[in-house]
Each structure stands twice: as C-alpha cells, then as structure tokens.
Amino acid sequence: EIALTQSPGTLSLSPGERATLSCRASQSVSSRYLAWYQQKPGQAPRLLIYGASTRATGIPDRFSGSGSGTDFTLTISRLEPGDFAVYYCQQSDTSPYTFGQGTKLEIK
Amino acid sequence: EVQVVESGGGLVQPGGSLRLSCAASGFTFSHSTMNWVRQAPGKGLEWVSYISGSSSTIYYADSVKGRFTTSRDNAKNSLYLQMNSLRDEDTAVYYCARAEYTYNFSFDSWGQGTLVTVSS
C-alpha cells in the first residue's frame, strides 16, 4: 500500500499570503495519478488538481500543483477567505487508492 | 449536469447489514469507473472500493475486504455497496465518486454522502 503523508497538519495563514502544502508518498507514484482535493465543513470534497499539475474545471489559477515521484506540492498563491479548508492528496496509481491524512488551512 | 446521489444510510447494529445506492445522471454511466469513499466523524477521507465500467475489475480496501461488495447496474445508472458484518469503525459518511479517464481517474464528481451509523 502506498502511504501518503501530508505536511503540515495545520497551516495558519492570513488572506493574501501564499500557502504551500506537501504530500510525500512512501513509494513512487506516477504523477499522472496524483490529485488534490479541497473539503469545506459539511461538504463533499472537490477536485482541485489532477495529474499532479492540471487544474480541474473552474479552479482558479491561484491553485497550482507540482512534483513527481514521491514528492508533490499544492500551492495557493494568494489566499482568499474561501480557501480556508482541509486539503487532501490522493493517488489512483495503485490499489488501494490512498488519501493523505489532510492539511487544515486555517485563518491566522 | 453530472450528478451522483447516494442513499440507503441509517442506523444499524454491529454485525448487521446495509445496502447503499448511488444514482448517477448527466453522463454515460457505463463508460465511467466509480468509487466509494468514506469519512468517519471528524476524520479524513478513506477510499473503500473501485469498480470499472463493465464491472470486470473491482478493488477493495483491506479494512472492508470480505465484508463489503461493490456492484453496479448500468441499465439503471446505479452503483451499490452491500455492507455486511458491520462494525463500529464502519460508522462514516459514505460518498460515491466518479473517476473519469479525462481526469486521469481522479475523483471529479462526488455525491453529498449518506451517513451510516453502526451502534447498539
């Protein structure tokens, strides 16, 4: 099983700042099958990034993804109030299709 | 509009059974792979199961293997999760999620979830 470890667990920032979220895999993951999701309280997750770096439909260009192999990063360039949520990375390369434990992005 | 809607959740005793359904609309269901994902109260996301469009390939998380069965009826645009021998730790919101080739099989569309509570 490929374990995904996200860091930090909680990130406290202010609107307008830049957020950098990390996702590290226990073994190499094809970047084609690495995705990022955003989840707000009481809502279903929403796909942000797929293929490690491609934004899903309707996702603003403030969100960007990068990485390969075992290290992946989600960057939010200028935080807006609606960006404060929990973010998960996930791999669909090898079953079981694991999620990271999540990074909570909170307002400082 | 792509839509998936889960149903069938509820309160069940440990050792009991429950069948969840997911109704799909707005896309060619038979062409899409589908997944079940769950989220225990206050916890993160846990992938549960995958099924290919033709049902020829099905995968399960180790935590549910041998107890849960995923199936689909393409004529009815529906996905199912039969859950047997339920345990306290199966308590969660269960989501169905589409995984399209277009999105490299990431989960691009999610339902609102259905809550399963396992308790005596």
Image (tube, rainbow, N blue to C red):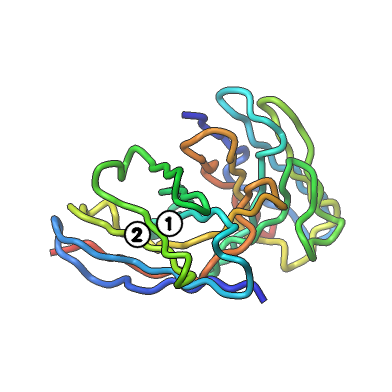
In the picture of the structure, the residue carrying the numbered disc 1 is B39
Disc number for residue B104: none
**x, y percent for residue B60:** 38, 43
**x, y percent for residue A59:** 79, 61
In the rendered structure, the answer to whether residue A45 lies left or right of residue B9 reads right
Name the chain letter of the residue that bears numbered label 2. B
Image point 64% across, 29% down: which residue?
A: A29
Secondary element at image label 2: strand
Name the chain letter of the residue that bears numbered label 1. B
In the rendered structure, the answer to whether residue A105 lies left or right of residue A74 reads left
Q: Amino acid at mark 2?
A: Leu
Name of the residue lying farthest toward the top? A27
Residue A1 drawn above or below residue B120: above
Secondary element at image label 1: strand
Quadrant in the picture for residue B117: bottom left
Quadrant in the picture for residue B119: bottom left
In the picture of the structure, the residue carrying the numbered disc 2 is B81
